[in-house]
Structure formats: structure tokens, C-alpha cells
Image (cartoon, rainbow, N blue to C red):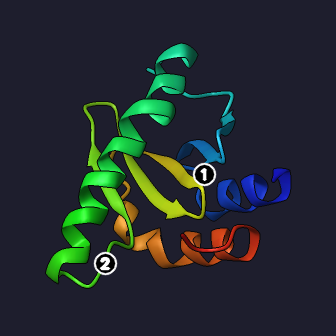
Amino acid sequence: MDQMLDQVFAVLSAIRYVAVLRDGALTTRQRPDVEGASASESDRYEELLVNPTLLKLATQRGEIDCGGLSHIVVGYGNFQQLVLPIAGGHVSVCFELGHDPQIYVNRIAQLVKRSAPPP
């Protein structure tokens, strides 16, 4: 898990935070110099409640007639968050504002795929 987190952070210096929720186990890491960071307890609830709910809703919609779901990008006031479904959970990557997560989706998805099988 640590190696995957290191590889995701190496993609771009503007990655603020990476989290993996898999089979109920949450692993998080935040870059130490992040300004305006959310409280760690807030991040925990984001990963345990918000992101799984968003993924469930979007996955169900995607399976009707959209060809499934590959990822979600959520734009918050202080950052943008990329959420990728994996077997048993998700990977969440937060980007500084001004950096488009869409540009990095394929690269990050490949890193995640090597470490975690698809859902």
C-alpha cells in the first residue's frame, strides 16, 4: 500500500492527499505542507461515508445505460478530488486548485490497477 501511495504522490507535486478504503480498512496520507487542509476527522468521514455513497449512486446510474463508471471528480472550494472505484472500496486523490484531475486519471488509474484489482 505504501508503495502505491508513494507512486501516486510522485505523479504531481500538487497532489495534497491520497486515501484508500478497501474492505473497511482506511489508509490515508497527506502531503505535509498543505495549506487549508481539511481536519483529519473530516477527511475520515469523507472516505467512510461521502465517497462510498457518491460511488454507489454514480455506479448504479452508470450501469443502466452509460457503460459503467470509471471515476468521479468532485470540485470543492479548496481542492478537487478524484475518486476511483476499486474492489472492496475506492482510491481518493486530492489535487490543489488549478490542476485538472482529468489530465491524470489514466496515469493514476494504471498505478492503482497494479496495486488493487478493479471493482
Rendered location of residue 112, percent (x, y): 65, 68
- The quadrant of the image that shows the C terminus is bottom right
The answer to whether residue 1 is above or below residue 85 is: above
Closer to the camera in the image, 57 or 4: 57
Closer to the camera in the image, 27 or 103: 27
Rendered location of residue 29, percent (x, y): 69, 36
Q: Identify the element where label 2 is drawn.
A: loop
The answer to whether residue 2 is above or below residue 36 is: below
Q: Is residue 2 left or right of residue 75?
A: right
From where the camera sits, is residue 64 visible? yes
Q: Residues within 10 Å of mark 1 (few under 14, many from 20)?
A: few
Who's the residue at 39% across and 61% down the image? 101
Q: What residue sits right under mark 2 in the picture?
A: 68
From where the camera sits, is residue 39 visible? no
Closer to the camera in the image, 34 or 64: 64
The picture quadrant where one finds residue 16 is top right
Rendered location of residue 17, percent (x, y): 58, 40
Q: What residue sits right under mark 1 in the picture?
A: 13
Who's the residue at 33% across and 31% down the image? 78
Circle 1: residue type: Ser
Q: Is residue 43 left or right of residue 56?
A: right
Q: Is residue 80 left or right of residue 108?
A: left
**First in sequence: mark 1 or mark 2?**
1
